[in-house]
Image: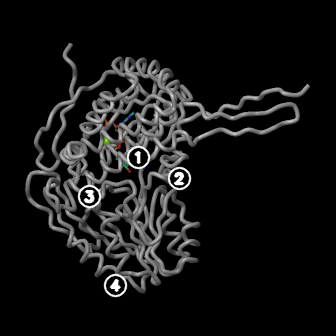
């Protein structure tokens, strides 16, 4: 029987790029078998050699920076400057975990009759299932700490955007000290992803994607009692108080919601603005949005590319009903490609579908508020809690509000969401568990306690 394939398309031109292999469940089981063998060898290698390998991956990624960025840009429709910065971030992530590898250690406690020691043991084989919006960064946030903790890793990338991860797999295989330590299995979520979830030899699944699929993975993982980390959707709030540098907040806001054409789980797609500065904020925000350049992702001055697919374009467009109060509708080019220019909606109630659901496209909803308590209440009126920003010159207020907003990551007077050094993950239905930082590495370990009797 011929090997099944998946077609890969360029969302900016609607041209066919290539086909990739569609792994069957049996193919994935074979990969898991190889990973089990590789992991046993890997965890016994000298520490310096394991660190060297992670540093070698970082070096290799940088040597192939432009190639990987071009693949990502063509496959996802991402502006080339963003794709290039993301590839550099991937190298930095491997570098960070190379350095972290020998800094994780257990603990000891003396007891009346002996000493108890704790060890952070590798889990074994890790299955990583990634989405299409940031294929390489999200893969690296899991591959690097999982390898550093002594595990083998198999990644199943999104079917729409498998190219950069597949290439990373080839590059890593070329320098890996152990065959099968890192593998990429392309194919459908339910078949290739499902095989990783069902197989008892996989100890943990790290999934990034929609809340709906995350829920189904959590249910299926119960059978083999798999460890699960879930990074899911978001509808994050950008809170702009009247005591903020309103101009700075308004100029930063387009990047916070429209970068990656809004296809970002951390997008601050609800902008909560104190009523007294609403006019000033809206004027500056529209001006800054108007300046964004939509177009060819390969052009160095492009800010916004297309949406990832025709299907996703349809799903986003459904939110753009005529009955809403539009403050701004960017001009969408009438050309091949899944283009959609930024849209800004005013919703006094904060209850419209556009204000409540994750759109995952270039759509911002502005919701006015009167008091600090109102701002916190509206920000928390969501099933999600992933990211967000607070703009205020009052440090006490910024910290007070930060403590009350139910979200895994917040930034004050900034759009920053993700740093490799600090944990990232969601409250509520935005997920469970944390990636990145030392917590991210510990998430790829099992804690073992060993008691040693020393006294009669
Ligand atoms: P998705 O449909 O949930 O897909 C994500 C991944 O899961 C893909 O690799 C997909 O494979 C796979 N998959 C689908 N069904 C599966 C199943 N039944 N079993 C196992 N794997 C399965 O999400 P998406 O549409 O690609 O991405 C958009 C969503 O991801 C948004 O909701 C966004 O917020 C979220 N996201 C979250 C974060 C975060 O860090 N919190 C980051 C990025 C994206 P196929 O491609 O083959 O279907
Ligand atoms: Mg999908």
Mark 1 to mark 4: distance in Å? 41 Å
Mark closer to the chain start, 2 or 3: 3
Give the labeled residue for mark 2. Answer: 428
Residue denoted by label 1: 93
Nearer-N-terminus badge (2/1) = 1
The residue singled out by tag 4 in the image is 279
Residue depicted at x 23% and y 52%: 78
Q: Secondary structure at mark 1?
A: helix
3D distance between C-alphas at marks 4 and 3: 25 Å
At x 33%, y 56%, the residue is: 359
Quadrant assignment for ligand 1: top left
Residue 153 sits in which quadrant? Answer: top left
The foreground one among 316 and 288 is 288
Quadrant for the N terminus, please: top left
Give the mark nearest the N terminus, 1 or 4. 1
Task: Provide residue 344's location: percent of width, then percent of height.
Answer: 28, 70
Say which label, 4 or 2, has the lower sequence index.
4
Identify the disc placed on residue 133. Answer: none
Q: Residue at x 49, y 59 (%)?
A: 409
| Alpha carbon separation for disc pair 4 and 2 | 33 Å
Q: Position of residue 382 (x, y in %)?
A: 48, 60
């Amino acid at each position: 029987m011929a090997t099944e394939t998946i077609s890969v398309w360029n969302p900016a031109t609607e041209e066919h790029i290539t086909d990739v292999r569609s792994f069957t469940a049996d193919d994935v089981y074979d990969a898991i078998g190889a990973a089990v063998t590789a992991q046993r060898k890997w965890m016994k290698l000298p520490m310096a050699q394991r660190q060297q390998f992670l540093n070698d991956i970082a070096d290799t990624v940088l040597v192939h920076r432009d190639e990987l960025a071009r693949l990502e840009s063509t496959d996802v429709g991402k502006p080339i400057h963003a794709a290039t910065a993301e590839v550099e971030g991937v190298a930095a992530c491997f570098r960070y975990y190379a350095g972290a590898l020998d800094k994780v250690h257990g603990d000891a406690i003396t007891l009346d009759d002996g000493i108890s020691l704790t060890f952070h043991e590798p889990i074994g084989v890790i299955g990583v299932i990634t989405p299409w919006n940031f294929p390489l960064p999200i893969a690296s946030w899991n591959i690097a700490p999982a390898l550093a903790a002594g595990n083998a890793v198999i990644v199943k990338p999104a079917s729409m955007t498998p190219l950069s991860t597949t290439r990373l797999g080839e590059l890593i295989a070329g320098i890996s000290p152990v065959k099968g330590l890192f593998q990429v299995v392309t194919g459908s979520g339910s078949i290739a992803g499902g095989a990783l979830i069902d197989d008892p030899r996989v100890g943990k699944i790290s999934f990034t994607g929609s809340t709906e699929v995350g829920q189904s993975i959590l249910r299926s993982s119960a059978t083999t009692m798999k460890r699960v980390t879930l990074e899911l959707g978001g509808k994050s709030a950008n809170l702009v108080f009247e005591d903020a540098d309103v101009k700075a907040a308004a100029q930063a806001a387009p990047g916070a919601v429209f970068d990656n054409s809004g296809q970002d789980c951390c997008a601050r797609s609800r902008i909560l603005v104190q009523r007294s500065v609403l006019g000033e904020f809206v004027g500056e925000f529209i001006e800054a949005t108007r300046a964004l350049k939509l177009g060819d992702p390969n052009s160095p001055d492009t800010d916004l590319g297309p949406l990832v697919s025709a299907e996703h374009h349809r799903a986003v467009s459904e939110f753009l009903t005529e009955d809403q109060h539009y403050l701004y509708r960017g001009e969408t080019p009438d050309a091949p490609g899944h283009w959609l220019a930024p849209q800004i909606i005013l919703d006094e109630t904060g209850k419209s579908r556009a204000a409540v659901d994750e759109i995952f496209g270039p759509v911002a909803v502005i919701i006015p508020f009167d008091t600090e308590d109102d701002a916190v209440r509206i920000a928390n009126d969501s099933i999600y809690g992933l990211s967000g920003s607070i703009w205020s010159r009052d440090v006490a207020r910024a910290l007070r509000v930060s403590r009350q907003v139910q979200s895994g990551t917040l930034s004050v007077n900034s759009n920053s969401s993700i740093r490799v050094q600090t944990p990232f993950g969601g409250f509520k239905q935005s997920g469970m568990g944390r990636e990145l930082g030392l917590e991210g590495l510990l998430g790829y370990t099992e804690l073992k306690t060993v008691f040693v009797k020393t006294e009669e």
